[in-house]
């Protein structure tokens, strides 16, 4: 084991316990009977309640000693490691998050407080009781039905429809046996020495660098850049293999749960068993098992969503962030953190390696590689016969389409050709639902959300209107909510569901599948649909950005982008970067096997510099130009930003606070930072709360967090006023 042995506090010693309660500090308690280790997970009394916490260090001793209470009990879980405590402290300081909220991310393990790691289970034995009752017979029958399988007391009693005492009554005779069984079982061993695929020269060279980085046993970040299908996954699995050989644990972060199924299968093919899985779709039992086994070093590899970064790894040696540019690595509510950046922080504290994989890196990572902070590895060719698709624009200015049609004749012809050949075509539109706007033809009003300044989006599949901001839904009305006119509501603009309707009319013979996250009840259903499509279960795929995220559809040879201009409209700092990434990613779905791919981009601005850069495929020029523009403007990654969102139900109060903060900006000016605003946030009302935004801009090296803390600390938030500070904001809503 690495790290130093934890300090120990004997019974009665003062310890500081940090809980997940919103308090501004750790509280003093006395170590319980038997003492406790630094980092121990404990339960402590807090007011009338008992809460869980972690022994964070020696007590402060600044509280009336006669009133200090004792730790109630130490939980049956390995103590939190020093490294994890420091990581949480540094992550909290970076993101300006209170430490208790940070701790909550690291203790999202259901059943953490469950007493024993062993539990009693019950199964059928050989004996027979002297006296049989109807209830006892039912227990024995239920146990016999299980064929030797053991259940907990509660489970067996429920299966038999009896009380637990009936089951217990069968123990003395040996008719039912009671045994100890581990609550959570270790994960099957992964074998890093099973043969991997024979790598191409490019791939082998990249894999060698990662292996060397792994053996060095030092922190280092590698940007693994390669077009979709170039074998990045094959390459970083070699880094995983090297890490496992060292007896260290590996973490692979994926941006999308739906991607894990395919990935798990690949891991199984490579290492002979599936790794542990950590995401919101997993059951509580699975999550508890993963958390505990990760802590005990009994899970060698974890595949998961961003929150997996806060698992209690015992000896983490490698973190892979796949599709590192993906926006979903940024958590946008609660604790505002970027999992990619926190991965780098955590690895640097552990002497672990980070691999950031992407076909279209974020400008931040590109710039870090450019500056020599990250090592960059390029895979330039697609594996095998596959080549990058040809890309062309379709100039929509020349096309006269009816108002409710979005597929141009040229795109339709291309689709028909592919479908007739038995290949797949993807129509890409980054808009969920049926239509983005529902308009009343009588009064001209658009139907909006009652709680947000957002339009309600019609989801015809659900027969409801949905607010994409707050999630509020209501049945599709027949009368206008504004003027009450009956049957005058009209859908305006396209969403994927409406596009599917158009496609069905244009291509009556084709099998059409819509891939949009909201059409599937569960992650499992979505996975199943993706697998069906990959196996050829559809001719035309209609999808939102969900499809851009690394799914492998071997039969797909045509990508039609319905509205390539969509992402360019906002004033967002990252509009160009995002559009570039998304269009390249989507186009990259086509032609992943021998059959050549074609990407057609419908656009009204074929001469827009971003559209031209996408077509030219000259990525380095694009990054360089974009980097230069940001450098000149002092924008990230060449300057620093923090977004501050103030909210309240009272619009006056929230503007008053914003103005007060904007005027009293001395703390910010001291570090060379400027504050802009207040201005209404782009979405000025969410869930009934008015939102006002300030933007703080600082030079690159500025000690921004300290200045922000001082600045924000000048005001007391009274009533329902809230302030959220977003360091390195990704989007501006
Ligand atoms: P990326 O992660 O860059 O998108 P993948 O690693 O998924 O690329 O590779 C694309 C496809 O090519 C996968 O089906 C993968 O198994 C296959 N592939 C890549 N490299 C090799 C190789 N050296 N030998 C055999 N198959 C390979
Ligand atoms: Zn809403």
Image (cartoon, helix red, strand yellow):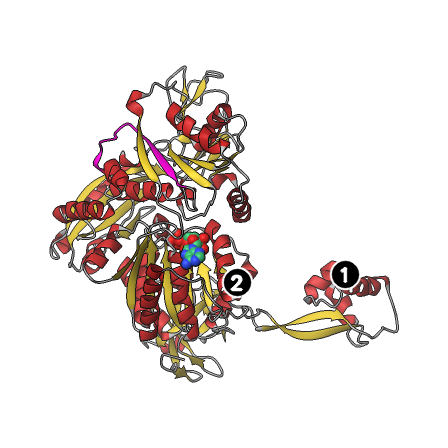
373 and 437: which one is in front?
Answer: 373
Q: Which contiguous range is marked in magenta?
A: 596-609
Outermost residue to the right: 131
Q: Residues within 10 Å of mark 2 (few under 14, many from 20)?
A: many
Left or right: residue 20 compared with residue 632: right
Is 432 situated above or below 410? below
Q: Is label 1 in a helix, a strand or a loop? A: loop
Q: Residue beneath label 1, please?
A: 162
Q: Which of disc 2 and disc 1 is earlier in sequence?
A: 1
| Left or right: 257 as drawn, with respect to 162 | left
Q: Foreground residue, 118 or 364?
A: 364
What percent of the width, then of the height, locates residue 689? 35, 40
Q: CA distance from mark 1 to mark 2?
A: 38 Å
Q: Which residue is mark 2?
A: 274
Report x, y in % for residue 649. Answer: 34, 39
Pointer 2 residue Cβ closer than 8 Å to ligand 1? no
Query: Where the C terminus falls, by quadrant?
Result: top left
Residue 720 marker: none
Q: Do the CB atoms of the residues marked 1 and 2 lie less than 8 Å apart?
A: no
Mark 1 or 2, closer to the camera = 2
């Amino acid at each position: 084991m690495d790290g130093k042995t934890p300090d120990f506090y004997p019974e009665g010693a003062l310890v500081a316990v940090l809980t997940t309660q919103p308090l501004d500090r750790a509280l003093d308690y006395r170590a319980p009977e038997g003492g406790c280790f630094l980092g121990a997970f404990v339960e402590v009394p807090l007011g009338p309640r008992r809460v869980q916490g972690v022994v964070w260090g020696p007590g402060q001793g600044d509280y009336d000693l006669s009133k200090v209470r004792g730790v109630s009990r130490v939980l049956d879980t390995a103590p939190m490691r020093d490294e994890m405590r420091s990581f949480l402290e540094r992550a909290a300081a970076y993101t300006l998050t209170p430490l208790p909220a940070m701790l909550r991310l690291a203790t999202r393990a259901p059943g953490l407080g469950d007493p024993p790691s062993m539990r009693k289970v019950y199964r059928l034995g050989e004996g027979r009781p002297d006296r049989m009752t109807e209830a006892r017979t039912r227990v024995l029958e239920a146990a016999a039905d299980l064929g030797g399988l053991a259940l907990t007391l509660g489970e067996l009693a429920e299966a038999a429809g009896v009380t637990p005492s009936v089951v217990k009554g069968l123990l003395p005779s040996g008719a039912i046996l009671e045994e100890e069984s581990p609550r959570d079982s270790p994960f099957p061993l992964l074998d890093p020495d099973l043969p991997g695929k024979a790598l191409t020269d490019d791939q082998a060279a990249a894999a060698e660098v990662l292996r060397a980085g792994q053996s060095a046993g030092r922190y280092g970040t590698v940007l693994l850049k390669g077009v979709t299908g170039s074998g990045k996954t094959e390459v970083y699995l070699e880094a995983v293999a090297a890490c496992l050989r060292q007896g260290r644990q590996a973490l692979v972060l994926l941006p999308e749960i739906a991607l894990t199924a395919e990935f798990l299968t690949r891991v199984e093919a490579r290492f002979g068993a599936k790794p542990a899985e950590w995401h919101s779709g997993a059951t509580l039992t699975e999550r508890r098992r993963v958390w505990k086994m990760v802590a005990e070093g009994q899970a060698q590899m974890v595949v998961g969503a961003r929150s997996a970064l806060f698992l209690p790894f015992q000896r983490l040696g490698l973190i892979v962030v796949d599709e590192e540019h993906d926006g979903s690595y940024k958590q946008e509510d609660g604790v505002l953190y970027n999992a990619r950046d926190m991965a780098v922080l955590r690895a640097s504290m552990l002497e672990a390696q980070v691999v950031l994989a992407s076909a279209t890196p974020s400008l931040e990572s590109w710039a870090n590689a450019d500056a020599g902070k990250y090592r960059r590895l390029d895979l330039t060719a697609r594996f095998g016969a596959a080549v990058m698709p040809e890309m062309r624009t379709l100039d929509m200015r020349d096309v006269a389409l009816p108002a409710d049609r979005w597929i141009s004749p040229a795109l339709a012809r291309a689709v028909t050709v592919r479908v007739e050949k038995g290949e797949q075509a993807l129509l890409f539109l980054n808009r969920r639902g049926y239509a983005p706007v529902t308009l009343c033809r009588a009064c001209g009003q658009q139907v909006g959300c009652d709680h947000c300044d957002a339009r309600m989006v019609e989801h015809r599949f659900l027969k409801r209107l949905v607010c994409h901001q707050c999630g509020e839904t209501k049945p599709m009305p027949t009368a206008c909510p504004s003027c009450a006119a009956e049957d005058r509501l009209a859908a305006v603009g396209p969403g994927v569901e409406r596009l599917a309707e158009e496609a069905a009319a244009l291509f009556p013979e084709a099998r059409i599948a819509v891939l949009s996250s909201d059409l599937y009840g569960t992650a499992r259903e979505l996975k199943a649909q993706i697998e069906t499509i990959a196996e050829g279960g559809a001719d035309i795929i209609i999808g939102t950005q969900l499809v851009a995220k690394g799914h492998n559809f071997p039969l797909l040879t045509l990508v039609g982008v319905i509205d390539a201009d969509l992402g360019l409209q906002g004033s967002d700092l990252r509009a160009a970067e995002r559009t570039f990434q998304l269009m390249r990613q989507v186009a990259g779905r086509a032609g992943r096997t021998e059959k050549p791919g074609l990407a057609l981009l419908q656009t009204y601005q074929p001469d827009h510099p971003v559209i031209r850069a996408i077509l030219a495929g000259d990525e380095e020029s694009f990054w360089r130009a974009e980097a230069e523009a940001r450098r000149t403007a002092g924008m990230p990654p060449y300057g620093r930003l923090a977004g501050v969102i103030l909210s309240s139900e009272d619009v006056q109060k929230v503007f008053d606070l914003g103005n007060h903060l904007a005027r009293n900006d001395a703390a910010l000016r001291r570090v060379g930072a400027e504050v802009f605003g207040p201005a209404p946030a782009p979405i000025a009302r969410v869930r009934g709360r008015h939102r006002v935004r300030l933007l703080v801009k600082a030079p690159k090296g500025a000690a921004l967090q300290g200045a922000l803390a001082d600045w924000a600390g000048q005001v007391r938030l009274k009533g329902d006023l809230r302030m959220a500070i977003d360091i390195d904001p990704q989007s501006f809503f």
